[in-house]
């Protein structure tokens, strides 16, 4: 199962042994029978904000006993005993455990089976329990009452006043302000108990939900036949604010009265739960606000449920097929809050894991049917989702904490054949994993063996983008809209078993003007939906443009300012140093160890542009923190690429000897070359930097694996980028056989000029010498500045009818005279004429055409002997 429940509390294990010990200590007769009775009546009543659990049971005399389990100390405590046979509706205890509020209903005298008497009175009592003292009747009415103490965020000091909420079945909510005082030492009593102030804070509602963790009360009013969701936020200073009003496009006029998270409602029959609507509000610290709704349903052929993503400005309505009509259940649909996800669960049918932080694309959510064994671990009885991924099973008396089952998700990732499931699981594992390094390693292993398994998206791209996003998200949650979460922008493929309709909805109307914490983030999300029409998410388009400009300027000889280039390259060095500092294991040879200026330029440009992007959109975050975030983000991106290559390298057991050219090719080398090519394609389309040394490794494997014509095609089409390191190894490792010379010549002519000149000086070959000479003479001619006419040669001493040659001879004479002291210049000029004989042949052809072969021969000899000092060098 994708979600695993771990019990934090179990009545049978955490309370019953304590009760047994208490009864044994009193040495009461017939204790065993009493214990069985205790267990049958034992049930959870409430879970308070601090995690303390209130429970009750009936002793052998049918008295109601209230107990508390402290989740911190793991100890039980007796709170109070009502010496009457009553049915408990609701119960709550204040933070100091000095006051107990309880709502009780009288039972029939006959049978004593806890059956409710028609028209019975509901008593709402306030009891002093430190020590047990007075009992105050707050309400004595014919309708049901639920109670809940507020738990503000304050220090350990006791509060002078407690706040108690009373929720009435007559559709009103009151807040009691209870002042307490200490008498006779530690004795706590209610001050002015006859006149406890109260405020009516809500009326005429049909549905309400209590959020114990955040101390919020949600309720729905019916205004002009519209359902309006409202929220009250309670504060430590004992005040409360109406935070927002949000219209809901659902019908609640005939739904009756519904409470969520006010304890177990024993009035509801579990067999009829599927007949009721289900509605829950879920939030998390990122500023999300979701309302999950499932209407009443009678047909077991399909089920419809909706999620209102108010923080995104739209709702999604899902319709799921339930399979065979005979597989009916006794429980309705259940929504579970799993922080960044909401789970929609129908036992025996499906489990839908909804991504509420990034819900735009359905492929980022996971839909599992009964064929995936969705009902292996979740209980089939009625259970309630509480804050902080807590799940309360009322029937079994267990409080669970929900976790994603990482081992199950990883197994499912290996076995599933659907691209949508691979996408959803990939994001789920990366976002919710505790040991990110281990989980990333498992995913990298899976990618290395299934690199071509996905057809709807690029698996490598998605992994790199998603993992880099979650690495920075842990440091700040304000990056939802400014950093890419996925490489996929659209998804048009259907998800088997479910259909979807998306509609825009009205945004909540915020009723306050000053926000903090969660409300500030929610308001920011709403503002983004309202006003952020340009797409704010970062991409490398500016980096791409600037990088191409720098490369073009390099080719034309232009240069940016030294300070600008130094800053860019220093940023790249910091990224590489950051990666090396965080990685204790030795890196694969060449990766991050090569001085590849082009990749470092791209790397430094991305750091610079991403820093500017975050500074622009992360208002209020320190510049130093943003710079560290950028450094960590780019470092993680580059590190993931290194780990992908190294995992493939180790998986195929390639040795360092592969880095040499004078060895036969092997099948594993081709596999690694294929994966590196896929990595290159993935990064090129997103214009992401690659670790220095990547292109060298790729080229070495390409030379090993590809026939010459394919190799040259890869080079000409930019798949293989020739680096100085790779070509130098090739020149040194291979001898000058005919086959190897052909390979070397083919690569040499494709090298950039600067690298080509360096390689020629390494290769001991006549052609290499010729290229060096030609290059140097070309530079001499390009840099030549014409002297005044009187310093040139006497034209009468040597002249030919071929006018371009006359001018060329003048230039050579001038160069000869200016290079008197330079043996290198003389040698290169001599090599130019000695190897090419280009100009003599050109003149000879000119004169042959004109029918003067004797003069052509004489001119050729004169041209060869003209630069006397140069020829004398040979």
Image (tube, rainbow, N blue to C red):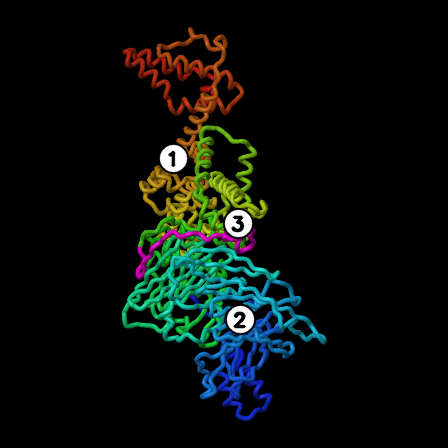
Q: Are marks 1 and 3 in contact (CB under 8 Å)?
A: no
Q: Is residue 141 above or below residue 714?
A: below
Q: Residue at x 51, y 17 (%)?
A: 818
The N terminus, quarter of image: bottom left
Q: Are marks 2 and 3 in contact (CB under 8 Å)?
A: no
- The answer to which of 452 and 298 lies nearer the viewer is 298
- The answer to which of 250 and 172 lies nearer the viewer is 172
Residue 476 appears in view: no
- Could you classify mark 1 by the number of other residues whose Cα lies within 10 Å: few (under 14), some (14-19), or many (20 or more)? few
> Upstream in the sequence, badge 2 or badge 3?
2
Location of residue 859 in the rendering, given as x and y in whole percent from the top left corner: 36, 13
> Upstream in the sequence, badge 1 or badge 3?
3
Location of residue 358 in the rendering, given as x and y in whole percent from the top left corner: 43, 54
- The answer to which of 419 and 850 lies nearer the viewer is 419
- The answer to which of 535 and 750 lies nearer the viewer is 535
Location of residue 361 in the rendering, given as x and y in whole percent from the top left corner: 38, 53
**Quarter-wise, where is residue 874 in the image?**
top left
User: Mark 2 falls on what kind of element?
Assistant: strand
The residue range painted magenta reads: 494-523
Residues at marks 2 and 3, CA–CA distance in whole angstroms: 49 Å
Residue for badge 1:
750
In reply to whether residue 505 is colored magenta, the answer given is yes
Mark 1 vs mark 3: give the one in front: 3
Residues at marks 1 and 3, CA–CA distance in whole angstroms: 37 Å
Q: Looking at the rendered structure, which numbered label has been put on residue 686? A: none
- Could you classify mark 3 by the number of other residues whose Cα lies within 10 Å: few (under 14), some (14-19), or many (20 or more)? some
Residues at marks 2 and 1, CA–CA distance in whole angstroms: 81 Å
Residue for badge 2:
147
Q: Is residue 760 above or below residue 254?
A: above
Residue for badge 3:
632
């Amino acid at each position: 199962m994708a979600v695993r429940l771990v019990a934090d509390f179990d009545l049978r294990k955490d309370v019953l042994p304590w009760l047994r010990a208490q009864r044994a200590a009193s040495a009461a007769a017939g204790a065993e029978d009493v214990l069985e009775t205790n267990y049958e009546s034992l049930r959870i009543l409430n879970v308070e904000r601090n995690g303390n659990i209130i429970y009750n049971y009936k002793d052998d005399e049918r008295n109601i006993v209230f107990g508390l389990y402290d989740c911190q100390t793991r100890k039980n405590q007796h709170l109070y005993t009502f010496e009457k046979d009553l049915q408990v509706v609701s119960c709550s205890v204040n933070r100091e455990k000095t006051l107990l509020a309880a709502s009780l209903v009288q039972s029939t005298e006959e049978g004593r089976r806890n059956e409710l008497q028609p028209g019975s009175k509901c008593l709402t009592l306030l009891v002093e329990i430190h020590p047990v003292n007075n009992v105050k009747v707050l309400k004595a009415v014919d309708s049901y009452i639920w109670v809940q103490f507020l738990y503000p965020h304050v220090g350990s000091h006791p509060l002078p006043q407690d706040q108690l909420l009373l929720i009435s079945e007559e559709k009103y909510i009151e807040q009691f302000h209870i002042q307490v005082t200490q008498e006779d030492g530690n004795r706590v009593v209610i001050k002015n108990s006859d006149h406890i102030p109260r405020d009516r804070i809500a009326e005429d509602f049909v549905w309400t939900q209590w959020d114990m963790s955040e101390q919020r009360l949600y309720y729905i009013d019916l205004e002009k036949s519209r359902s309006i969701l409202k929220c009250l936020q309670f504060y430590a200073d004992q005040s409360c604010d109406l935070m927002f009003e949000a219209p809901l496009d659902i019908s609640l006029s005939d739904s009756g009265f519904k409470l969520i998270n006010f304890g177990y409602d024993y009035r509801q029959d579990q067999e009829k739960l599927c007949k009721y609507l289900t509605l829950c509000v879920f939030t998390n610290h990122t500023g999300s606000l979701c309302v999950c709704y499932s209407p009443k349903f009678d047909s077991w052929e399909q089920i419809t449920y909706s999620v209102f993503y108010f923080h995104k400005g739209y709702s999604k309505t899902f319709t799921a097929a339930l399979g065979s009509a005979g597989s009916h259940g006794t429980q309705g649909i259940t929504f579970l809050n799993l922080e960044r996800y909401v789970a929609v669960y129908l036992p025996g049918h499906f489990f839908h894991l909804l991504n509420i932080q990034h819900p735009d694309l359905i492929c980022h959510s996971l839909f599992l049917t009964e064929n995936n064994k969705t009902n292996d671990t979740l209980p089939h009885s009625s259970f309630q989702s509480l804050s902080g991924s807590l799940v309360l099973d009322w029937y079994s008396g267990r409080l669970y904490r929900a976790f994603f089952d990482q081992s199950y998700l990883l197994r499912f990732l290996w076995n599933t054949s659907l691209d949508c499931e691979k996408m959803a699981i990939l994001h789920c594992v990366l976002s919710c994993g505790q040991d990110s390094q281990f989980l990333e390693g498992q995913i990298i292993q899976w990618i290395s063996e299934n690199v071509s398994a996905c057809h709807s998206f690029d698996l490598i791209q998605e992994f790199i983008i998603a993992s880099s996003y979650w690495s920075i998200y842990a440091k700040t949650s304000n990056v939802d809209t400014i950093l890419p979460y996925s490489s996929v922008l659209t998804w048009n493929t259907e998800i088997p078993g479910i259909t979807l309709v998306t509609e825009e909805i009205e945004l909540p109307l915020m009723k306050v003007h000053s926000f903090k914490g969660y409300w500030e983030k929610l308001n920011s999300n709403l503002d983004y939906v309202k006003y952020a029409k340009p797409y704010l998410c970062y991409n490398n388009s500016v980096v791409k443009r600037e990088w191409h400009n720098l490369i073009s300027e390099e080719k034309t000889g232009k240069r940016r300012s030294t300070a600008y280039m130094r800053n860019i390259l220093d940023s790249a060095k910091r990224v590489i140093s950051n990666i090396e500092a965080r990685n204790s294991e030795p890196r694969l040879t060449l990766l991050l160890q090569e001085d590849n200026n082009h990749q470092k330029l791209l790397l430094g440009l991305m750091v610079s542009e991403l820093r500017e992007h975050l500074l622009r959109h992360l208002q209020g975050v320190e510049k130093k923190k943003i710079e560290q975030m950028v450094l960590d983000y780019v470092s993680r991106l580059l590190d993931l690429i290194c780990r992908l290559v190294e995992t493939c390298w180790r998986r195929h057991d390639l040795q360092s000897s592969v880095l040499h050219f004078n060895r036969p090719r092997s099948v594993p080398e081709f596999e690694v070359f294929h994966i590196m090519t896929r990595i290159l394609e993935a990064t090129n389309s997103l214009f992401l930097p690659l670790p220095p040394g990547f292109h060298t490794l790729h080229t070495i494997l390409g030379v090993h694996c590809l026939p010459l014509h394919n190799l040259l095609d890869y080079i000409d089409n930019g798949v293989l980028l020739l680096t100085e390191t790779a070509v130098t190894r090739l020149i040194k490792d291979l001898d000058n056989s005919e086959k190897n010379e052909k390979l070397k010549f083919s690569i040499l002519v494709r090298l950039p000029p600067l690298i080509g000149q360096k390689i020629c000086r390494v290769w001991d070959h006549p052609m290499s010498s010729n290229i060096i000479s030609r290059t140097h003479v070309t530079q001499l001619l390009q840099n030549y500045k014409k002297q005044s006419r009187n310093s040139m040669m006497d034209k009468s001493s040597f002249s030919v009818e071929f006018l371009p040659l006359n001018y060329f001879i003048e230039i050579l004479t001038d160069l000869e005279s200016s290079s008197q002291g330079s043996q290198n210049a003389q040698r290169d000029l001599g090599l130019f004429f000695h190897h090419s004989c280009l100009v003599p042949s050109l003149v000879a052809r000119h004169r042959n055409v004109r029918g003067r072969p004797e003069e052509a021969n004489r001119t050729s000899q004169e041209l060869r002997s003209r630069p006397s000092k140069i020829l004398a060098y040979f």
